[in-house]
Image (cartoon, rainbow, N blue to C red):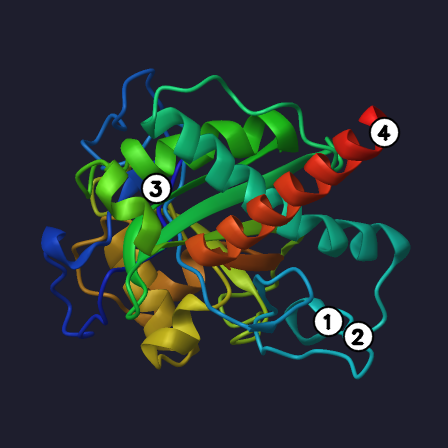
Amino acid sequence: MASSCCGTKKQKLNGTYAGTNGYSSTSSSSSSSGRGSNGDEGVTNNHHCNGRIGGNNQYGGTQGSNDHSVTPAGGYMPNGHGGLLNDQKSMVNSMPDMCFYCFEVLYRELHNMEEPRTPCFTNDPYPLFVTWKIGREKRLRGCIGTFSAMRLHSGLREYAITSALRDSRFSPITRDEIQRLTVSVSILQGFEEARGYLDWTLGIHGIRIEFYNERGSKRTATYLPQVASEQGWDQTQTIDSLLRKGGYRAQITPETRRSIKLTRYTSQEWHMSYNEYRELLDKQSHNHSNMLGKVQC
């Protein structure tokens, strides 16, 4: 099932949502084209998302939990929770490499170069999103992901390109723009069925809802954890926005909200600018040259 989960500007919760606000609705059906069966701007089994910039890290990128919490030792606290498991720590340590890989994939695609070599980070399957933003204001430039668990190597390669070049809300990213880009990688985890439409926490959980519209068609829609906080919404406003985004056009009543099925989840995110990518690339090239020099001697 497909849905979208990001916006390009703040919504006004007046019950009317124009297609130009960057939000696209989706249905539970799918097709092999670049659009859902209801004309949604997306890719089959794909989802649009949004991201947030967090604090600095040793890789030159930026990490962000949904409340921007960082442990005193520099560790990562996903979605405001402390006490990482070993696999979570391994995932966080790998995320700068994932952002670097996304830049490598896009750069080589735009310059008609061969694909980058297979990355060294884990290739375990996860739901994921890749977001591209541009300029100092971090304007959304493309973002698509999937709730289906994909092997990270192929998944990041696919969505780095898909979100940059095939997000139908935007024109494809060009070579001239790449130096102004920031990439964000979001890995989704911890999916739980909620006990009601308010059984989730702002700034911690992303939410995905399933509901039937006024015509009796089953629809889905989702927001990543940071979206509601960025928009300044409370829980009810977020639910109402998500219903509109999913294509619900009738009056939203308390009964409407209670009828939805809500799944909550968390995400781990990392962000990297083009300049940070180039710094890492130059460092790798320098280290490689030093190694060759030693071998030759």
Q: Within 10 Å of the Cα at label 4, are there few (<14), some (14-19), or many (20+) other Cα atoms? A: few
- Is disc 1 placed on a helix, strand or loop? loop
Rendering coords of residue 119 (x, y %): 68, 31
> Cβ–Cβ below 8 Å for labels 3 and 1?
no
Closer to the eye: label 3 or 1: 1
x 21%, y 31%: residue:
38
**If the image is split into quadrants, where does the N terminus sit?**
top left
> Cβ–Cβ below 8 Å for labels 3 and 4?
no
Q: Earlier in the sequence, mark 2 or mark 3?
A: 2
Relative to 12, 142 lies left or right? right
Closer to the eye: label 3 or 4: 4
Closer to the eye: label 2 or 3: 2
Front position in the image: 211 or 237: 237
Q: Amino acid at mark 2?
A: Gly
Rendering coords of residue 113 (x, y %): 42, 20
> Cβ–Cβ below 8 Å for labels 2 and 3?
no
Disc 1 marks which residue?
Answer: 77
Relative to 232, 203 lies left or right? right
Instruction: Measure the alpha-carbon separation of dots 3 and 1.
Output: 33 Å
Rendering coords of residue 74 (x, y %): 76, 75
Front position in the image: 221 or 121: 121
Q: Amino acid at mark 3?
A: Arg
Q: Amino acid at mark 4?
A: Cys
Q: Amino acid at mark 1?
A: Met
- In the rendered view, tell whether residue 133 sits above or below residue 110: below
Q: Quadrant of residue 196?
A: bottom right
The dot on residue 82 is: 2
Instruction: Measure the alpha-carbon separation of dots 4 and 1.
Output: 46 Å
Disc 3 marks which residue?
Answer: 219
Instruction: Measure the alpha-carbon separation of dots 3 and 4.
Output: 65 Å
> Cβ–Cβ below 8 Å for labels 1 and 2?
yes
